[in-house]
Amino acid sequence: MFSYRHAFHAGNHADVLKHMVLIQILRYLNQKDVPYMAIDTHAGAGMYALDGNFASKNAEYETGISRLWTRKDLPEAVADYVGLVREMNENGRLRHYPGSPYCIQRVMREQDRLRLFEMHPTEGNVLEANMRQLESHGEGARARGKRIQVQKSDGFQGLRALLPPPSRRGVVLIDPPYEDKADYRKVRDVLVDSLARFATGTYAVWYPVLNRMESRQLPDKLKLLPAKDWLHVTLSISGPSPDGFGLRGSGMFILNPPWTLEKTLRGVMPWLVEALRADDDAGFLVESGVPLPSGTKPKAR
């Protein structure tokens, strides 16, 4: 149950997609003065050492952030993301990588709030320490315990108590490890409940592009949920491996996305595929639509 450690995968191509999209959502929310709440249901440790024992074992960051680190032709959205990574690597050497909690903390404003869930005992303790350190170097002691709260518990179960947020503005990142195939069902179930409580919230779901049936079916199931509209983007750096194993790609499915996000992704994704491709089967998908009645086959636009 507690075998998954995101440090093994920190900074890989899936993180590039997830964090680039997340930052763009937050930038959009920042355009209004009204505060918002950001919630991460599976927060991990918050930040990672790429030269540590976990991240260096498979060096997955070489499929992602490492390929962007020295590029001088970054599109605006990619440059925004890479710039945030550079903030925690002051000497210009790529040694540390920010998890979603760090990304959110750096983009959100003083009036906004961040709620983090992590049920892995070790990861939860590290996350708590990392967030405490960030706040002490940021807004100071007066903000500690207000802007960021860490709950060492199941984000699927804990999310409902936070919805709707007091300001009725918010974004929820849902990115479980999917090692247990039940996570696919839990994602859909928690979204059904969350939309009933907070229909106007933005929900960003990360998932792995795998050969398993649950992964292939998840986007079509999410297209039927009663949100105002949806946006779906995938990035694959290679074709399937002969044995069917390995993470070759990932997707982000956003319910109630910012209206600007689709245009941004359609402009960025061709460049990103070329920058990260591992073989000629690399590719991307950007599609959007509105929910359809249950039993109707979704059609993208």
Image (spheres, helix red, strand yellow):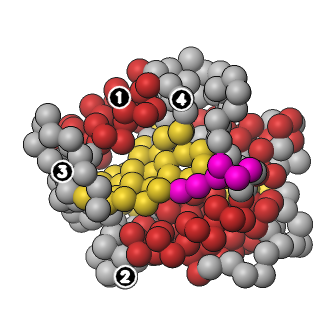
Going by the numbered disc 1, the residue's amino acid type is Lys
State which mark lies toward you, 2 or 4. 4
Residue 42 visible in rendering = no
- Whole-percent x, y for residue 94 in the image: 84, 62
Of 255 and 55, which appears nearest the observer? Answer: 255
- Residue 177 vs residue 136: left or right? left
Mark 4 or mark 3, which is nearer the start of the sequence?
4
Relative to residue 15, is residue 86 depicted above or below?
below
Tell me if residue 195 is in the magenta stretch.
Answer: no
- Residue 25 vs residue 119: left or right? left
* Residue in view at x 80 percent, y 60 percent: 66
Mark 1 or mark 4, which is nearer the start of the sequence?
1
User: Where is the N terminus found, in terms of image quarters?
Assistant: top right
Mark 4 or mark 2, which is nearer the start of the sequence?
2
State which mark lies toward you, 1 or 2. 1
Magenta segment range?
279-284
